[in-house]
């Protein structure tokens, strides 16, 4: 077969078929269109203002590694004037997170960005390894999800950043839309497709890769020879998400626009006022100051269950009643440090790559 | 029986299914069964074809894969979500499974299904 010529520059050999458009393009044109589309997403959604301090949620995986690289590239190319940081959460999973954090540490050097690692151990006094050894492999993802969300916000507050960007891509978002539909969680549908979300007093979170296809992210990492880590979490067989993902890939194989169509469907679900009214009002957690829809936030509830040896009390109502019947919360219970929103000065010193520190 | 030599690379966690080895060199026959049966001893030339990527994938499943074939193949081809590059070019531009392999070709398989 004669080599195909790039549909954009009409010079170089085409090396990739774009999933979005079917266009056949060369490596250099691919880098350019991929980066430019992310730039367009950023500018059209007004994600940043000059001088913003932005943390990249970095797991060492493909999406966040490519995001860090592209954010750095665009920040320099288009003078966004952003201060970029890498923020990693160490869940304490031996043989998984310790290896992926090594990748993030290399990224810190390669991209010359300050890195902050915040561990579950220092924040909650529990690693995921310890949690799993107490509760087994049921509900462990609930603990991890609640703890990670709060840890990211707290890490961001420590870095005194305005904004967290995450590597969620179009495939991830379409998958989440499907899962919310299958679970009947209509209230979440609109929010999960939003490019930028902000709670009452939390740090903004956004997804510059909202319209970037997974295939292109992986191809980008491959062609650029980016250093990323790819092993499934050893505790995570999130079977439900796995099915949604496999289903989505099958749909995409039959019709490439399926992913973007599903995202648009999610966006089109408007939450009616009556439904909004039943959603609980946000307040702050009595114990740790993090935003919450109850007197205690989810993380504090889960932590109390762990500390008192009744881990399910944060998960089922029955176990919760049992915990309450055991008596009031002990005075000396381990709690999460009080949450303070970013104020003026960075709360902590960050580790800066050696070259810039000198 | 004449053979060709290929370089096979894995990425994105797919190597875990292949003895956790990222790079492999393999030899496969030039002429193979049209039904991709990799166990045929005496090849009938009437039912033979030049070796292609489709045969390669069957060969990999039958002779290289160490575990969980369903994570590599589905419906006679690689599972959706696995990217294939032939000499660094997206296999979708090279005829996918119908691409006829040449001596020295490099084929890369990358899983996109592992976490971000
Ligand atoms: Zn080109
Ligand atoms: Zn709390």
Image (cartoon, rainbow, N blue to C red):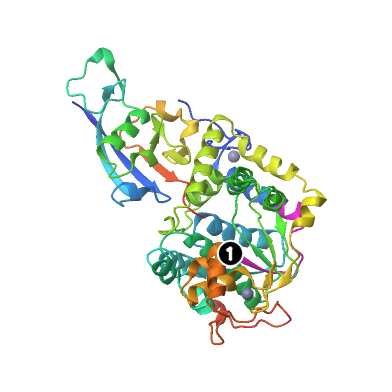
| Residue that carries the numbered disc 1 in the rendered image | A57
Identity of the residue drawn at 55% across and 74% down: A325
Q: Residue furthest bottom?
A: A332
Q: Is residue A247 above or below residue A61?
A: above
Is disc 1 surrounded by few (<14), some (14 to 19) or many (20+) residues within 10 Å?
many
Q: Nearer the viewer, residue A3 or A244?
A: A244
- Left/right placement of residue A266 relative to residue B53 reads right
Q: Residue at x 47, y 48 (%)?
A: A239
- In magenta, the rendered stretch is A41-57
Instruction: Depth check: give the residue in front, A321 or A77.
Output: A321
Left or right of A122 in this view: A296: right
- Helix, strand or loop at disc 1? strand
Q: Quadrant of the N terminus of chain B?
A: top left
Please state the horizontal and vertical placement of residue B25, each as a whole percent of the image.
Answer: 27, 43
Chain letter for mark 1 = A
Where residue A42 appears, as percent x and y from the top left, is 72, 55
Quadrant containing ligand 1: top right
Q: State the residue at coordinates (63%, 60%).
A: A71
Q: Position of residue A184 (x, y in %)?
A: 64, 45
């Amino acid at each position: 077969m004669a080599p195909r010529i790039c549909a954009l520059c009409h010079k170089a050999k085409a090396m990739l078929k774009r999933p979005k458009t079917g266009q056949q393009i060369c490596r250099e044109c691919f880098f350019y269109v991929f980066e430019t589309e992310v730039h367009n997403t950023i500018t059209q959604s007004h994600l940043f203002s000059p001088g913003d301090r932005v943390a990249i949620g970095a797991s060492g995986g493909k999406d966040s590694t490519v995001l860090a690289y592209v954010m750095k590239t665009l920040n320099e190319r288009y003078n966004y004037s952003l201060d970029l940081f890498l923020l990693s959460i160490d869940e304490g999973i031996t043989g998984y997170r310790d290896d992926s954090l090594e990748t993030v540490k290399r990224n810190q050097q390669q991209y010359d960005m300050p890195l902050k690692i915040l561990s579950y151990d220092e924040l909650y006094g529990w690693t995921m390894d310890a949690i799993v050894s107490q509760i087994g492999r049921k509900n462990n993802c609930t603990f991890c999800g609640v703890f990670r969300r709060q840890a990211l916000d707290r890490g961001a507050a420590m870095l005194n950043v305005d904004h967290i960007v995450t590597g969620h891509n179009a495939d991830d978002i379409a998958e989440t839309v499907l899962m919310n539909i299958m679970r009947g969680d209509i209230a979440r549908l609109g929010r999960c497709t939003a490019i930028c979300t902000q709670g009452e007093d939390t740090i903004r979170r956004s997804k510059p890769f909202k319209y970037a296809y997974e295939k292109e992210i992986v191809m980008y990492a491959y062609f650029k020879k980016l250093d990323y880590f790819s092993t499934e979490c050893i505790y995570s067989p999130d079977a439900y998400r796995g099915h949604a993902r496999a289903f989505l890939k099958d749909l995409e194989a039959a019709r490439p626009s399926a992913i973007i169509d599903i995202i648009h469907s999610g966006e089109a679900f408007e939450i009616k006022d009556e439904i909004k009214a039943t959603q609980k009002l946000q307040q702050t957690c009595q114990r740790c100051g993090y935003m919450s829809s109850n007197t205690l936030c989810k993380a504090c509830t889960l932590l109390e269950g762990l500390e008192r040896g009744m881990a399910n009390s944060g998960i089922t109502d029955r176990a919760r009643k049992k915990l309450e019947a055991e008596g009031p919360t002990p005075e000396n219970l381990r709690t999460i440090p009080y949450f303070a929103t970013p104020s003026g000065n960075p709360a902590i010193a960050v580790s800066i790559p050696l070259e810039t520190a000198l | 029986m004449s053979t060709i030599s290929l370089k096979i690379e894995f990425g994105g966690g797919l190597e875990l299914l292949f003895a956790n080895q990222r790079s492999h060199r393999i030899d496969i026959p030039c002429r193979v069964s049209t039904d991709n049966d990799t166990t045929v001893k005496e090849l009938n030339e009437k039912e033979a074809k030049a070796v292609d990527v489709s045969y390669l994938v069957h060969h990999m499943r039958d002779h290289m894969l160490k575990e969980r074939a369903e994570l590599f193949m589905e419906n006679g081809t690689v599972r959706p979500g696995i990217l294939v590059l032939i000499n660094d070019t997206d296999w979708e531009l090279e005829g996918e499974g119908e691409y006829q392999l040449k001596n020295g070709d490099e084929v890369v398989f990358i899983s996109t299904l592992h976490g971000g």
